[in-house]
Amino acid sequence: MAKWTFITNHGSVLALVAQHPRITAREIAATLGITEWSVFRVMSDLTEDGYVTRSREGRSNVYEVDHDLYLRRPELVEVVVGDLLKVMEDIKRQPGSEEEMEAGQQVS
């Protein structure tokens, strides 16, 4: 298995939270194969810098991603979070994606 990935834990957590606003740290950790502690650190970074806001509904956290904030890389100063998330979502919807394979929708 590769020792690195193109999308960091921060990007992966952000994408999951954008898709599932009520997701728990435990669910994020299980989905990404990282520890809950790592999820808490990433979420702390994302909330501290305003990429994610958290509110409480009963006993649950509900997250909201600010799609209008710019990415942090200097060479990507004109790209907003929403653009990145859209690309990631579009890739998941491509024919033959892992998501479709899991649902049993084979592409002919």
Image (cartoon, grey):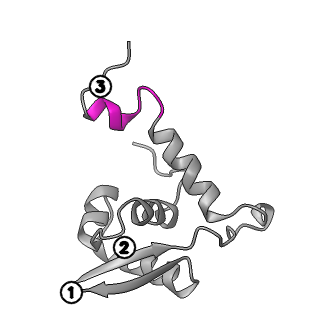
Name which quarter of the figure residue 72 lies in.
Answer: bottom right
Name which quarter of the figure residue 80 lies in.
Answer: bottom right
Q: Are marks 2 and 1 in contact (CB under 8 Å)?
A: no
Q: Which residue is mark 2?
A: 39
**Distance between the Cα atoms at labels 2 and 1?**
21 Å
Kindly give the residue lying farthest to the top in the view shown: 108
Mark 3, secondary structure of its residue: loop
Is residue 73 positioned above or below 62 on the image? Answer: above
Looking at the image, is mark 1 or mark 3 earlier in the sequence? 1
Q: Which residue is mark 3?
A: 105
**Distance between the Cα atoms at labels 3 and 2?**
31 Å
| In the image: residue 24, left or right of residue 94 | left
| Identity, as a three-letter code, of the amino acid under mark 2 | Val
Is residue 63 positioned above or below 30 on the image? Answer: below
Is residue 1 positioned above or below 69 on the image? Answer: above
Quadrant position of the C terminus in the picture: top left
